[in-house]
Image (cartoon, rainbow, N blue to C red):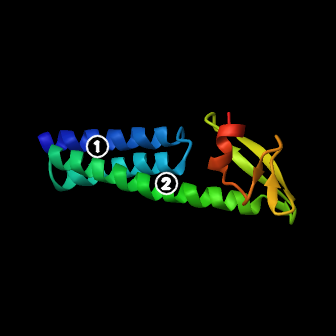
Amino acid sequence: MLRKLIATLTVLIIGLNLVLVSGCQTTAQTGALVGGAAGAGIGAAVSDTKGALIGGALGAGGGYLVGHGMDKKDQSREAVSGQQASDTVTIKIPNEDGTTTPVTLKRSGDVWVGPKGETYKNIPTSEELRPTYGK
């Protein structure tokens, strides 16, 4: 009886998590939700409540780590794919509200110059530009 209740609750939690995934702004957040739900479901199916809790925690942690790595790769690709010409690059800065702010840098000799006149030795990442240009 208890096992049936745990299985039913797990299915409901997984369904709710899948609905909530649409509100995630990063792959890391999505990975944590999906991993947590999957881990809890597997833990409940294999064991009991304790197994569901342990599985959920391990799944959420693993999902977050995988998603975080994917987010980092995406940020690197944005800088490279934003390249318009050999002396100009546009980097998209992700904002907290889910939008992005494009920042165009121009090469001037050995440095890159931002819209506010700041200079960088190398093309900065979106994370490095976020304090100045993010919302």
- The residue at which mark 2 appears reads as 68
Residue 87 relative to residue 75: left or right? right
Residue 75 relative to residue 9: left or right? right
Q: Residue at x 83, y 43 (%)?
A: 117
Is 12 in front, or is 52? 52
Furthest residue in direction left, as rendered: 1
Badge 2 crowding class, 10 Å Cα cut-off, few under 14, some 14 to 19, many 20 or more, is some
Residue 106 relative to residue 5: left or right? right
Picture coordinates of residue 49 (x, y %)?
Answer: 17, 43
Furthest residue in direction bottom, as rendered: 86
Look at label 2 and name its amino acid: His
Numbered disc 2: secondary structure: helix
Quarter of the rendering occupied by the C terminus: top right
- The residue at which mark 1 appears reads as 10
In this view, 28 is above or below 98: below
Quarter of the rendering occupied by the N terminus: top left
Q: Residue at x 45, y 44 (%)?
A: 18
Look at label 1 and name its amino acid: Thr
Numbered disc 1: secondary structure: helix
Disc 1 to disc 2, C-alpha distance: 25 Å
Report how many numbered discs are placed on residues in the image.
2
Callout 1 touching callout 2 (CB < 8 Å):
no
Any part of residue 10 in sight: yes
Q: Residue at x 41, y 38 (%)?
A: 16
Picture coordinates of residue 65 (x, y %)?
Answer: 42, 56
Instruction: Name the front one of labels 1 and 2.
Output: 2
Any part of residue 1 in sight: no
Is 71 in front, or is 52? 71
Residue 13 relative to residue 52: left or right? right
Picture coordinates of residue 74 (x, y %)?
Answer: 62, 58
